[in-house]
Image (tube, rainbow, N blue to C red):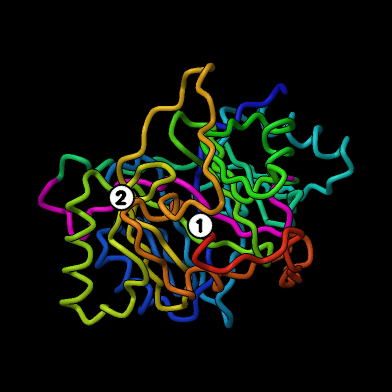
Amino acid sequence: MNFDIIRTGRAILHVTDLDKSRAFYEALGFIETASDDKNLFLRGIEEHNHHSLLLKKAETPVVEVISYKVRSEEDLDRLAAFFEKQGTKVKWMEKGSQEAVGRALRIQDVSGLPVEFYAEMEPAERLLQKYHLHKGAKVQRIDHFNCMVPDVEKAYNYYINELGFSCSEYTAGEEEKIWAAWLHRKPSVHDVAYMNGFGPRLHHVGFWLKDPMNLIDGCDVLASMGYGNAIERGPGRHGLSNAMFLYLRDPDGHRVELYNGDYLTSDPDFKPVRWDLDDPMRQTFWGHEAPDSWFEEASEVLDVHSNEKVKGSEPTLKKRKPTFVT
Ligand SMILES: [Fe+2]
């Protein structure tokens, strides 16, 4: 492939009440770069670009798009040519049509997820060493997307063979069918994970924290501000990825993961780690189960061309008991 996708860039989520969303995300330590009565642009303390999370006021909570940053404008042109050759309809978002972001292209990907690519985003002050401004869980940067799709192998094959992603870890079941896969462009465990389930839906957006104690700080601050019921799962340690995690539900039910401590995957001879579907340690290394909501609930997504909700479908692999699903 002749294009270079750098990393997970931003998510655009529709929310019903910007003030409620602002209070929640600021409690976690997100920094507000800009806002108006329709948009709230948020970034982590390490981020040097305008935003990694854009919340838009809307009637219904839904995912507008998940975005990847590419190396250059030329990469956008090459990606567009690639998609068009494959018969995938491309929607160009011209420079100036979106605040803070240059030219971007959007597609409905092989799983039906709304995906965007952009090269340019306005800079913002990096607050990593402005310690007096760090609050809550001290969210540092966006890390990954996790998506529920009905055919994980289809997504896996496409992102690896066509878009140049690499696999760090995966879960296999009967006949070695891939149940879930963690794929990356940046040298970490993932930029995107796909899990078997009703979809396409966005399961969560993962944000990186500087250390595990920040997960506890996040819980303490949320609880003391009356957001205790936003804590859905964790803190805990994943088997898969080895990272520490905390799953939260925002005021509209969108799920965010606070995440810390995976490992380097840059070596070309790194061998993907296989987990068996029946190994309970892969989802939570310490063995405790996730709640049913974590397996069943996820955010619906929009069609980039029609702006209608994408109709989901049941997974091709048969359902397993939630305790055996990561
Ligand atoms: Fe995650």
Q: Regarding mark 1 in the picture, which secondary structure is present there?
A: loop
Q: CA distance from mark 1 to mark 2?
A: 15 Å
> Of 186 and 216, which appears nearest the observer?
216
Q: Residue at x 47, y 47 (%)?
A: 144
Tell me where the magenta segment starts and ends, as one range. 131-153
Residue 118 circle label: none
Q: Mark 1 and mark 2 in contact? Answer it, CB < 8 Å.
A: no
> Of 18 and 103, which appears nearest the observer?
18
Q: Is residue 224 above or below residue 260?
A: below
Q: Residue at x 88, y 35 (%)?
A: 85
Locate residue 226, reporting x and y percent.
Answer: 22, 82
Mark 1 surroundings within 10 Å by alpha-carbon count, few (fewer than 14), some (14 through 19), many (20 or more)? many
Q: 272 left or right of 281? A: right
Check disc 2 and give the amino acid type. Answer: Met
Is residue 15 shown in magenta?
A: no
Q: 139 left or right of 309? A: left
> Of 214 and 33, which appears nearest the observer?
214
Give the residue number, with chain letter if any, for mark 2.
Answer: 244
Locate residue 89, reporting x and y percent.
Answer: 83, 49
Quarter of the figure with residue 63: bottom right
Give the residue number, with chain letter if any, for mark 1.
Answer: 326
Locate residue 109, reporting x and y percent.
Answer: 73, 50
In which quadrant will I find the N terminus?
top right
Mark 2 surroundings within 10 Å by alpha-carbon count, few (fewer than 14), some (14 through 19), many (20 or more)? many
Check disc 1 and give the amino acid type. Answer: Thr
Q: 36 left or right of 158? A: left
Q: Is residue 188 above or below residue 316?
A: above
Which dot, 1 or 2, sits closer to the camera?
Answer: 1
Q: Is residue 304 above or below residue 163?
A: below
Q: Residue at x 76, y 71 (%)?
A: 311
Q: Regarding mark 2 in the picture, which secondary structure is present there?
A: strand
Number of dots carrying numbers = 2
